[in-house]
Image (cartoon, rainbow, N blue to C red):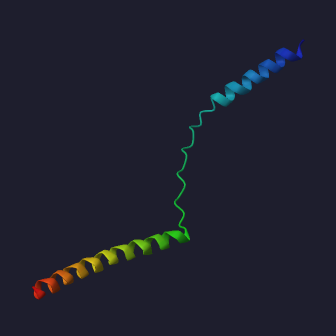
Amino acid sequence: MKPLPILLYALTCTLALGACSGKPAEPEAKAADVATPFDTLKATEQRAREVQKVVDKQAADQNRQIEAQQQ
């Protein structure tokens, strides 16, 4: 019967020391964004879309001018 109280005492002391260690919890660091090969592809695709919008707008303006001259 004597080992049981000693074991409980040791367990209690260990838990108390662990809970009261005084160390603040370390903040969780946010994982850094990792560049992938697809990032450059997406950026290139977006630039192509923007260029296409400009080209479409210029084509529409030119078509309007041509139609205005024909009338």
Question: Left or right of 43: which side holds 33?
Answer: right
In this rendering, the answer to whether 65 lies above or below 3 is below
Find the residue positioned furthest to the top.
Answer: 1
Give me the residue at 70% from left, 26% from top: 15
**Residue 25 versus residue 55: which sits nearer the camera?**
55
Q: Position of residue 18 (x, y in %)?
A: 67, 30
Give me the residue at 57% from left, 43% from top: 26
**Residue 42 versus residue 64: which sits nearer the camera?**
64
Give me the residue at 46% from left, 70% from top: 42
Question: Left or right of 45: which side holds 22?
Answer: right
Q: Position of residue 37 (x, y in %)?
A: 55, 71
In this rendering, the answer to whether 25 lies above or below 49 is above
In this rendering, the answer to whether 47 lies above or below 5 is below
Question: Left or right of 20: which side holds 13?
Answer: right
Q: Position of residue 68 (x, y in %)?
A: 11, 83
Q: Position of residue 57 (x, y in %)?
A: 24, 77
Give me the residue at 79% from left, 18% from top: 8
In this rendering, the answer to whether 66 lies above or below 20 is below
Question: Left or right of 16: which side holds 65?
Answer: left
> Residue 53 occupies which quadrant of the picture?
bottom left
**How many labels, in total?**
0
Find the residue positioned furthest to the front.
Answer: 71
Q: Which quarter of the image is occupied by the C terminus?
A: bottom left
Q: Which quarter of the image is occupied by the N terminus?
A: top right
